[in-house]
Amino acid sequence: MRLLRRLLVFSTVLLLAAAVGAQEPTPQAPPTAPAPAAQAGAKQGQPPPAGRRQGFAEMAARIFTPGAAPDPAAVERGQKLFAPTCGFCHAPDGTGKSGPDLVADALVIRDNGGDLIGRVIHDGRPGKGMPAFAALTAAQIGDISSFLHAQIRGAANRFAYSFQEVVTGNAQAGEAFFNGAGKCNTCHSVTGDLAGIAGKYQPPDLQARLVYPGPSFPGMGGPPPKPVTVTVTPASGEKLSGTLFSENPFEIGIKDESGAVRSLPVDGAKIETHDPLEYHKALIDTITDTEMHDLLAYLERLK
Amino acid sequence: MKLRLSLIALVLLGSTALLCSQELDPSALLKQPTDTWPTYNGDYSGRRYSPLAQIDSSNVGTLTQAWTWRRSGPRAAQPTLGSAVKATPLEVNGVLYFSEPDNVWAVDARTGTEIWHYEYPPNDGLHIGSRGVAMYGDWVYFETPDNYLVSLDAKTGKERWRQQMADVKLDYFSTMAPVIVKNHVICSVGGDTLDNPGYLEARDPETGNLQWQWFTEPRPGEPGAETWPDRGAMEHGGGMPWMPGTYDPALNLIYWGIGNPNPVHAGSGRMGDNLWTDSIVALNPDSGKLQWYYQNTPHDTHDWDSVQTPVLFDAVFDGKPRKLLAQANRNGFFFLLDRTNGEHLLTAPFAKTNWSTGIDKLGRPIMNPAKVPTHDGVLVCPSSGGATNWFAPAFDPPAGRFFVLASDNCSVFYLTAEGKGEGFAGRDFGLGAGKDALRAIDFQTGKVVWSFDGGSGGGLLATAGQIVFSGAEGGYLVALDPQLGNVLWHARAGRSSNPPITYELDGKQYVVFGVGDSLMAFKLP
């Protein structure tokens, strides 16, 4: 159990390391956690995360939003105060209209409990057209600061972003693609293997998987893909068949029926593989975005 | 007599001190080194091509391990994104200097024995990587996750000073290996989780004081401002120059790649080309003034950037001798420019791409408007990780080959924001179907002449011994033939985590790889 947990933490760290920033490759983003208070304006709630998803969400939050989160009650009070008082110029969510975007504002970001924005709110910026809000108390300004900091933290941690409307396609066209040009029904059945599929995945997961249900974010995107079967005929020695366990430029790992793994050199060997996902690999290059949206809309009916 | 003796002693002491103090003469950076690796790319050209040929294609198969250094001691308690040597070590006077976030080490280049270890205090900066250190005289320079430029004594690892480059509260974080050009420490900031402007800086090597700062977005009214809709978008436009650039001493120009614009996946609030994000820029290193620019991805919404090494070499192209600059860009295309003026010469894909409808008259790929992130998702190749990334490329002048670690991954890109958005403002879901490969590009045509599938890791090194060194899947280190791409040597040592380097000491050529938490040196038996 402890080993499992350590493996989990380790893989999460690795994945985060891979997924973070413009500065490193982002092979796979995990599904989102539900929106925090900071993203209260977002339309679409998602099912609560569980297990590894939760672990990932917590780690992402720690890394991208270090330090203590503002008190949710203060955030709520601040939001109620901000929208009618400041929202006309700065937009109800603080992202700016005629007034500047306060979520991307250095003074607001550096503010601590109103120590920097307090004076601006209290005195206004007459030269720039901002009126004074002298009636607001220090406590109220503190609440506004909490609300804005929740917004800033929401922007900083993209792994907590909420999706907008992902399912926009035409389900009928999706059904036609499923049974026609897409040839999905060659291997799949909506009453068989795909029954209830929409209840198992969130729409962005399902949309990625319908194109290629490969080794996506481990433990998050569902079961591992069907194994690749392989037969290796070495330059000398016995022929070996089984499922593909590992692969690199120098050797191939094969798992036989008993579960034993053997590694064989690639050099000089004849290798025959059958990848059940070969069709999906080709689909990446041929499916249009419209077909992808339509197919998602169709599969979303399979709750 | 006594006085005279002490005078002599003083003079002697003084001259020894002078000799010893000059650990790295900055003018040594202008030479093609064999006994040192004095700057991030080995020399200013970014080619990562060493003239050393003791290890060559005929004997590389006998390479044996010389030593291993492994990180020891307690780890920082704060969240860290996996600890690995991603840095390119410097090698000066038989000592290797390299870094991880918050850490710098000096290690004996002959034995792997640790000489000193400097640890920077815990901080809130993003601990994603550290590309290495710079060296000037007796001093080592590195950037911290919370945006300080720190100078250390190369002999002892004692801190001399630290100077703040940016405020960590604004979510800047710094990872670049600084580059010494004359008496300038060129350093930079990174971080695109909030919408901050990027900039390059030059600092005084003695004091760390600012010499100049160059912002990657223009100010209102300046040339380039017309590529942004308004002041707000420009001032929050991102563009982090987070990888070390290159330098041409004869033209007195530094070449730097600039990062992606912000908000990352939402372009509606920043309509226009968004200069100088996703561009290669040429600056005067003494003034920080822009000489020319070339934008590889106008109006990027996929988190690509142009920070990949701008590699400098001189060659005949199209019948004309040229001073060239080549880059394999994260957007999937290889670019060849004339580095005197930024004139475009060639654009060609080296990995799977589906986002462009063609090449415009300036040689820039034309964005297909249907592949811009949407609320319901679009399938785009390459993924946000890119067709390549920070992994160092290499260029072999005699072979005329440009080598790059490429990836053919695709993602479904989503816009999550409503309106102009903040920060990333979107997400991408990688499909995980693409393979990694080491590809050799003929710079004359842009064509991929061979591809070594499974080539991956932290970067490449080419040598006059007719070898390209790389990592490969399965935890292998490999040596390949630059013309054909066939394997000359391989060793299972662990996953390559940095670009390898080479140097010669006491008549022996060493090749050093970063492998996770270790450095591993190889030589002939």
Image (cartoon, rainbow, N blue to C red):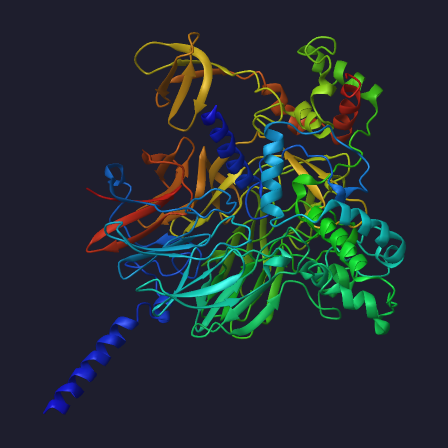
Work out which residue is located at the far left of the displayed protein and give it.
Answer: B1
Q: Residue A263: horizontal and vertical position, in percent? A: 36, 19
**In the image, is residue B210 above or below residue B55?**
below
User: Looking at this view, is B377 or A98 the one in front?
Assistant: A98
Please say if A185 is above or below B468. above
In which quadrant will I find the N terminus of chain B?
bottom left
Where is A88 relative to B161, above or below?
above
Tell me where residue A296 appears, x and y as whole percent. 76, 24
Q: Across the whole image, how many numbered discs are drawn on residues?
A: 0
Q: At which x and y percent is residue B7?
A: 17, 88
Locate the C terminus of chain B and report the quarter of the image it occupies.
top left
Residue B318 in sight from this viewpoint: no
Q: Image check: B215 left or right of B273?
A: left
Provide residue A61's location: percent of width, then percent of height. Answer: 62, 42
Q: Find residue B136 and report its image quarter.
A: bottom left
Q: Is residue A258 above or below residue B425?
A: above
Quarter location, residue B25:
bottom left
Horizontal relation, residue B157 to residue B364: left or right: left
> Going 60% across and 62% down the picture, which residue do you hit?
B167
In this rendered view, identify the residue nearer to me: B243 or B509: B243
Q: Is residue A134 visible?
A: yes
Q: Residue shown at 70%/48% (left/top)? A: A155
